Image: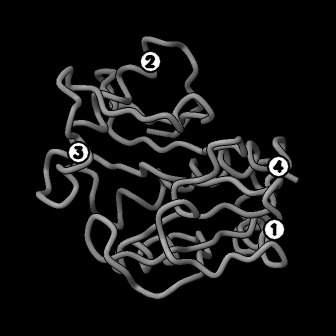
Amino acid sequence: MRFEEVSAPEAVERIFAFRYRILDEKEETRKLLEGMENGLESDAYDAHSVHFAAYDEAGEVVACTRLIRPSALGLPTLNNTRHHCTPEMCDPGKLGEFSRIFVAPQLRSIRKLHPLFDTLKIVGYKKMRDLDIVDTVGVLEKPFFRLLNMLGFPYEAVGELQSYYGMRYPSRLNTRALYDANRELFERHGVV
């Protein structure tokens, strides 16, 4: 399994259905589904996003995320949390956001996540580089923040732990730091 960029409308709709199922698993995230009667979870940021998905052998979505590009909407993390991502730290014109990072329950072990997320690092880094995104932000639960760092995504907190659909850190991932933390992987795959 590997992450790949998805743009076909029917494939993106399958991602929205997967997101709905994952958000429906937990009481605190179920609130995000209010008003979404069709079994698809989406919001206004999706129109400004690059979508990524991973599929199992049967072609079912088993993981997804999106990279929100800069737009007039801003970014969910900056619009909804107390953060310290100042213009000096994060150039708003070169800032994106990774969000809706979801994985099917059967893949939630470090042994299965590591190779899968290596593919996300590769396609995500390439897209960040191509879009000239210097930093991405996100809102991460403390255990997921630690897990992403263990998987080679060097996120740093840019705000205190705060209530946002559970307790989460506003966080930042620098594109160059992602490359530096995974130089061997990228070089092995011809990514510069």
Q: Residue at the spot x=77%, y=70% of the render?
A: 90
Q: Residue at the spot x=63%, y=34% of the render?
A: 48
> By what rule are the colours in the image chosen?
one colour
User: How far from the left and from the top, in percent, is residue 89?
Assistant: 79, 78
Q: Number of marks in the image?
A: 4
Q: Residue at the spot x=79%, y=53% of the render?
A: 133
User: Closest to the observer: 13 or 167?
Assistant: 167
Characterize the local packing of mark 4: few (<14), some (14-19) or many (20 or more) Cα atoms within 10 angstroms. some
Q: Which residue is mark 3?
A: 22
User: Closest to the observer: 42 or 192?
Assistant: 42
User: Closest to the observer: 59 or 52?
Assistant: 52
Q: Amino acid at mark 1?
A: Arg
Q: Residue at the spot x=31%, y=38% of the render?
A: 19
Q: Earlier in the sequence, mark 3 or mark 2?
A: 2
Quarter residue 176 falls in:
bottom right
Q: Is residue 14 left or right of residue 114?
A: left
